[in-house]
Image (spheres, grey):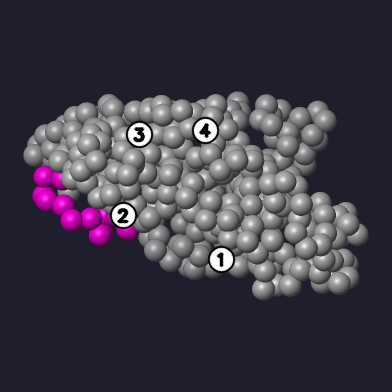
Amino acid sequence: MIWITRSPNLLTRKASRQSAKFSVLTQFRYLEYLSHVCPTAKETLQPLTYHTSVLYTGAKECMILTYKVKHNKDYSSELVKALKVAEFTLKQCTFSSKDVKHLGLKSMIANQILRKYGRNKKMKRVSSVNLIIPNQGIKVDKKARNIRIPCLKLSFYYQFPNNFRKINQIEVNNQYIFVSVTVLEPIPIDNDNKWIGVDLNTTGHCAVVGVPSNGKVYKLGKKALHIRKKYMQIRRMFQIQGINLQLKQVKRRESSIIKDLDHKISRKIIEIAKENNAGIVLEDLKNIRKTAKINKSFKYLLNSWSFYQLKNFIDYKAKLHGIPIAYIDPRNTSKTCSRCGRIGSRMAKQFKCLCGHVDHADVNASFNIAQRKQASVNLVQTEMYQREALILPNGSAGNETATIEPSLL
């Protein structure tokens, strides 16, 4: 939320929970109005444009990304020492590098391991530990694209984008270097209130995408259900035989396959949004496993549903590409008719309405998800037009005053 007083130098910014109700388009128009009615504050407004757009979409100013780089050095002795430090701090609950000085690990790395494992009260044992180097122990040359870690006598070139603000920390194991960097979120695109709806499902397709602007439908991730059922039977066989080692391997294999599939689905959804210059709308499925009324046969499918992982993939990839993302209440999205708005009847994957509309239930839900967001944005914009808080369609700004009262916000 931005308040402007009579003095442009007193421009302040205040975030509130209600700010997430406004669309990115609304905020950009509102900033345009502020700079129009108060020309002396224009220079002060421009630096805040990016921060405000991020603030109003409920997102943070920065993102933390981790890149993986392969190295060809042997750090087995340092990794053994790091494991001993982690085991020591779990037993002794110590946070001082002086207590583990006798183990011979560099104090900079030992301090990070002590902090990571000493504060985790739930952890009882540890099997492997990475070498953790903080920001203070890292030297970066962006021009040469080189990163140097003096305490490990390690220097390597990186190929990932050079637009990061800083390196937070680096973790090293015997094969890879994990570089954690902070990057600025790009300014969200002006989607002109165009949205695509994404309906996430446990059965059938993982995600059904509806594009109201052109009527197209995309069904993604059909083989996920087959993968879950296949590995459920394999795990059941190993459980009966009592083969725990192979059981763990099968679990890891299934999770890696589903993760790869979720990455592919999320990339496709981002491509669809970019092609249509639209934002993405998802259902808010928080606590769905606790609130859903299901029978026993459906319980396994619900508990093995990776909707949270898929949602996170869509979320961070949308932020990287500057695509607005929003969440709506999932209530009756598959029972409401996307044409007339009345409650219809749903049998399995088939939807029927009294108006004569017949459709696939998930397709109908995807259009409802997008249309609900469009309707809510239109309502907010109409209200702000009435309050003269936005630029009117003909370019006029209503009553031109140099001061905007907080009540208008």
Residue segment shown in magenta: 287-298
- Circle 4 SS class: helix
SS type, badge 2: loop
Q: CA distance from mark 1 to mark 4?
A: 26 Å
Is 376 displayed left or right of 131 in the figure? left
Three-letter code, disc 4: Ala
| Mark 2 or mark 3, earlier in chain | 3
Residue under the point 72% across and 52% down: 391
Amino acid type of disc 1? Gln
Residue 105 highlighted magenta (yes or no): no
Question: As rendered, which of 398 and 273 lies closer to the eye?
Answer: 398
Quarter residue 219 falls in: top left
Q: Position of residue 352 (x, y in %)?
A: 20, 39
Residue 289 sits inside the magenta stretch: yes
Label 2 and label 3: CA atoms lie apart by: 17 Å
Q: Quadrant of residue 261?
A: top left
Left-right relation of 364 to 389: left
Q: Residue 334, position in %: x, y?
A: 28, 45
- Identify the residue under disc 2: 331
Q: Which residue is mark 1?
A: 18
> Percent x, y for residue 100?
58, 60
- Dot 3 falls on a residue whose secondary structure is strand
Query: Which residue has dot 3 on it?
Result: 208
Task: Determine which of the numbered discs, if any, sits on residue 273 in the image.
Answer: 4
Could you tell me which residue is drawn at 43 percent across and 44 percent down?
A: 371
Q: Callout 1: helix, strand or loop?
A: helix
Could you give the CA–CA distance between mark 2 and mark 4, rounded to whole angstroms? 24 Å
Q: Do callouts 2 and 3 mark residues in contact (Cβ within 8 Å)?
A: no
**Three-letter code, disc 3:** Val
Residue at (53% x, 51% y) in the render: 378
